[in-house]
Image (cartoon, helix red, strand yellow):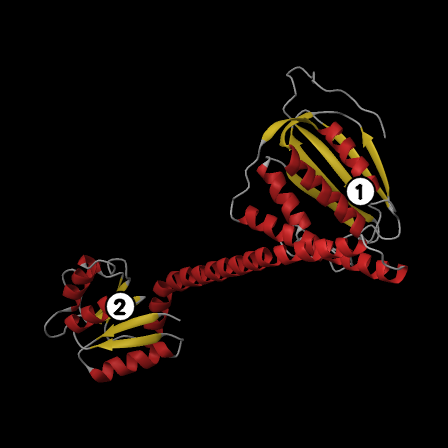
Amino acid sequence: MAQILLVDDEDSYLEVLSDTLALVGHDCARAHDGREALAAATGTRPDLVVTDQMMPRMTGVELLLALRETEGLAGVPTILLSAIRPAGFELASRFVQKPVHFETIQRVVGELVEPVARARSDQTTRNLAQTREEALNWVAHEIKNPLGVATLNVELLLSTMVDDFERKHLLTLKRQLERMDELVVSVLDAASVVEGRVTLRRSPVELGGLVGELAQDWRVGFADHVIDLTVRQRAVCDLDRERAREILDNLVSNAVKYGGEDRRIEVIVDADTDAACVSVRDHGVGISPQDLRHIFERFHRAKQGGRGHGLGLYIAAALARLHGGRIAVDSKVGAGSTFTLRLPRSDYLPGGAAAAGRGPRT
């Protein structure tokens, strides 16, 4: 819906024109001459001015000129109505000859206000998104401190003399608090990505070595899974080590969540002349084509199951892009998924030589 200012010295014509445009959802204000219209537009900026030419005190063309010379109103689109083309009619965005066919005026008005309505809708969407981001960040920040206090108190209770029944329930509570803390950290991490507040501290990192170190942690953290690591080709990349670790942790964590009954995760490090690659493959439920289209969107969770919060892959993909890389996914329902991280390598030498060679299977 657009805010339209109609200008004509005949009340009957204003009423018919207003009713005609109201039928297609526009909100119309009325003025009886150019001076009244200029005062109204100065008070409340309209999306469009539709003015007759022949009016007392100020003609339509004079109004168009005044609008152009008034700060804040120069960009307002205008339609000039007249039986003949007066001198200066080209000042109007559109000229419509009288008698006016109402289908014509509806169409011309629609063409002029559609970009305005689209821009307003886009701005509203941006404002809502910003409000949501601010609320989400505020909640995450406010929750983090009480979570920390609760976790410390649970740990204090666990360190005292408690029986097996109490210990069991305290450990369950601690795991849930840790899960909530992970969610808060992910929300704040995602907010940093969205707001462009992530700064990379790059240094040369041999990717196979980094993945080898991480594999030891994964085998401890996911003790009920088999982490099968193969380093086919070693390569050096210019990375923020901690952010690279975050990417890989998210990919392996995702494989664990959606790996199903087969608890084997295959991690392969390889390289070509341009990039180093880490593939993480599970043998679980796979991803449907519908979910695959949205897999890297924030808060998206696949319908096939799992207990994730829909932020890990979003963060991983965003951090990969910040490194100049990307994450690709290949999946089939019931046959598992393979996520492949590609990062630009910094050690490749012209002529086929490379600073790092092949590595073993571990």
Q: Residue at x 36, y 65 (%)?
A: 113
Query: Could you tell me the amino acid type at mark 2?
Result: Val
Q: Residue 339's x, y, as percent? A: 74, 43
Name the residue furthest left: 57
Q: Residue at x 25, y 80 (%)?
A: 14
3D distance between C-alphas at marks 1 and 2: 61 Å
Q: Is residue 93 left or right of residue 142?
A: left
In terms of secondary structure, where does tag 2 sit?
Answer: strand
In terms of secondary structure, where does tag 1 sit?
Answer: strand
Q: Which of the labelled discs sits on residue 49, or is there none?
A: 2
Q: Quadrant of residue 302?
A: bottom right
Question: How many neighbours does mark 2 have within 10 angstroms: few (below 14), some (14-19), or many (20 or more)?
Answer: many
Q: Which of the labelled discs sits on residue 340, or is there none?
A: none
Q: Residue 225's x, y, as percent? A: 86, 45
Q: Residue 186's x, y, as percent? A: 64, 50
Q: Residue at x 22, y 66 (%)?
A: 42
Vertical side of 28 occupied by 293: above or below: above
Answer with mark 1 or mark 2, whichever residue precedes in sequence.
Answer: 2
Query: Could you tell me the amino acid type at mark 1?
Result: Arg
Residue for badge 1:
281
- CB atoms of marks 1 and 2 within 8 Å: no
Q: Is residue 272 left or right of residue 56?
A: right
Q: Quadrant of residue 338?
A: top right
Along the line of sight, which residue is nearer the eye, 107 or 347? 347
